[in-house]
Amino acid sequence: MADNDAPNTTPAKPAAEAAEKSVAEKANGGPASSESPAQPVPAASRPAGGARPQRGPRRERPDHRPRRRGPGGGATEPNPARPGARSTPRVTEWFQDLRQERLRFELEEIWDEGKLAYRWTGAITPPPPLVEPRGLSREQCIEIFRWMLLNRALEQQLENLYKQSRVVGGVYFGLGQEGCSVASAYALGPNDWMAPMIRNQGSLLVRGFPARDIMMQYMARADSPTGGKDGTSHFGDLESRHVVAPISMLGDLIPVMAGVCLGERLQGREIAAMTWIGDGGQSTGVFHEGLNLAAVQNLGLVLIVENNLWAYSTPLQKQTRIRDLAIRARAYGIPAMIVDGTDPFQVYQAAHQAIERAHAGGGPTLIEAKLMRMKGHAIHDPAAYVPAAMLEFWRLRDPIARLEIWLKRKSWLDEAAIEEMRRAVESEILAERDAAEASPMPPPERAFEGVYCDGCHDPRPRFLGRGRRRP
């Protein structure tokens, strides 16, 4: 499964302007001037029979396709040339590749004892060091590290609760994706919105949900955010945290978050609305519909495609022939970035850039995060279809281990400080688990509460028309 570079394009010829000037001079019988345009040929001087005078050689159409200047660079795209007018370049930045390494490996289908299996081929190499964070202080880098530790400790407790038969339903893990979930949500402002997916537990923690809420939700307890009516991650907070609940139909959050941006714009605010989707979910039709809506309306949608290489048991190359999913943004005319999803600083940098663009009214951005789902689709899935060598390759890119090494090299944390932080996180998670288990199961009579609106809010429209607000 090798990553393909974005398509190379041919730059406009440097001599295009001089060639156009020469053509104009030949056609008009003298030097062309932008101040004195050529006069039309009088009708009396035209050849008999209505034939038009012979024109000069046909002017070649300039190449308007963008040219990539390398990772993180812009591209120049000339404006359509007019006779006698100077062509000025227009700068575009539709594609940036922020990664420090290009993944070079292949997955091959094989038959092993009559069963379909996959063979992974590639070099198991160590990852590069993390990029230097831009716009993050020492305290903020350490805070991101702690959120990631809390994210992993929470999922370990959820696995324990499941094995003790205390979870109602299944459990979905984001092992190996903590850096992406935490760092992207960390870049959001207080007035921005987000809509997590099942593997984005870290984003919920960053946004202010206590770990007990997530554990109570999985255990369907009475004090959970949904009052025990849902046994997984379908909960949010529209009032204070600006969090839209996940939707099981993958991709449907994209048009919903586009609508959130549109609603805020109608109230005079340009905000960023972030949501996540996997490589499997981006193959759905609603992915196209929602992203196209955001592009056409120039809405501040920040879409993070977590390319974790497996849609349940379907590898990426069985979904699409492209390997860089960010290339699809070009079809919608919006900017795109590719990041190493196991490098939290790269993720933060890309997310922060996209959020700032949204605040400035610059429209949507697609960010592809390259990473690996290190466990099965859910706890019931042992992921035996994943080759062991592939798991080893990505185990070396554990985002928590990479950030720990980086913090030690910067002398911002030593081994003793990290161990103390781990103990504090573990103590916090155990206290949160105790509080979650102390919550009772919901009584049967509450089953019908909150299903329909019973006067909990005023459903009348807030706006009566363009610029007219309801009194």
Image: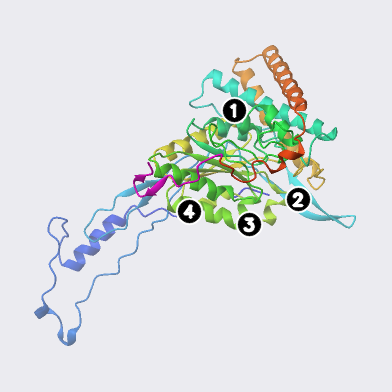
**Dot placed on the residue nearer the N-terminal end, 1 or 4:** 1
Which secondary structure class fits the magenta region best? loop
Distance from Cα at disc 1 to Cα at disc 4:
30 Å
**Of helix, strand and loop, which one carries label 4?**
helix
Task: Read off the residue under disc 1.
Answer: 208
Task: Read off the residue under disc 4.
Answer: 293
255 within the magenta span: no
Which kind of residue does numbered mark 2 sit on? Ser
Task: Read off the residue under disc 3.
Answer: 321
Which kind of residue does numbered mark 4 sit on? Leu
Task: Read off the residue under disc 2.
Answer: 313
- Is 385 in front, or is 271? 271
463 within the magenta span: yes
Distance from Cα at disc 3 to Cα at disc 1:
39 Å
- Is 400 in front, or is 24? 400
In the image, residue 254 lies at what x, y percent? 55, 48
- Is 100 in front, or is 397? 397
